[in-house]
Image (cartoon, rainbow, N blue to C red):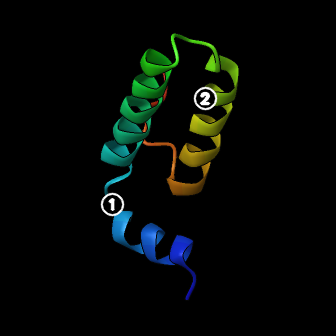
Amino acid sequence: MSMMDKLKSMLKGHEDQAGQGVDRAGDTVDKKTQGSYEGQVDTAQDRMKDQFGRGEQPPK
């Protein structure tokens, strides 16, 4: 079992919390780099959320 599979199984049912964690981590990186890599960070956040489940509520 790969590391990614282990993470996915651990996060099963907690997609909202995982999404929030990804957002916080990205915000921290943006703050530390003063937004220099904002585009790359946003792309990484989207890819991580896709891997772990979106964790977002659909728009109403």
Look at mark 1 in the image and give the residue it sits on: 13
Please tell me whether mark 2 sits on a helix, a strand or a loop. Answer: helix
Q: Quadrant of the C terminus?
A: top left
Work out whether 26 lies above or below 44: above
To which quarter of the image does residue 16 belong? Answer: top left
- What's the distance in space between the residues labelled 1 and 2, CA to CA? 25 Å
Local packing at callout 2 (Cα closer than 10 Å; few below 14, some 14-19, many 20+) is some
Give 28 or 56, whichever is nearer the viewer.
28
Residue 57, given in percent of the width and then of the height, sits at 41, 32
Work out whether 41 lies above or below 7: above
- How many marks do you count on the picture? 2
Residue 60 can be seen, yes or no: no
x 55%, y 89%: residue:
1
Identify which amino acid the numbered label 2 is placed on: Val
Look at mark 2 in the image and give the residue it sits on: 41
x 63%, y 14%: residue:
36
Identify which amino acid the numbered label 1 is placed on: Gly
Disc number lying in front (1 or 2):
2
Residue 32, given in percent of the width and then of the height, sits at 44, 20
Work out whether 19 lies above or below 28: below
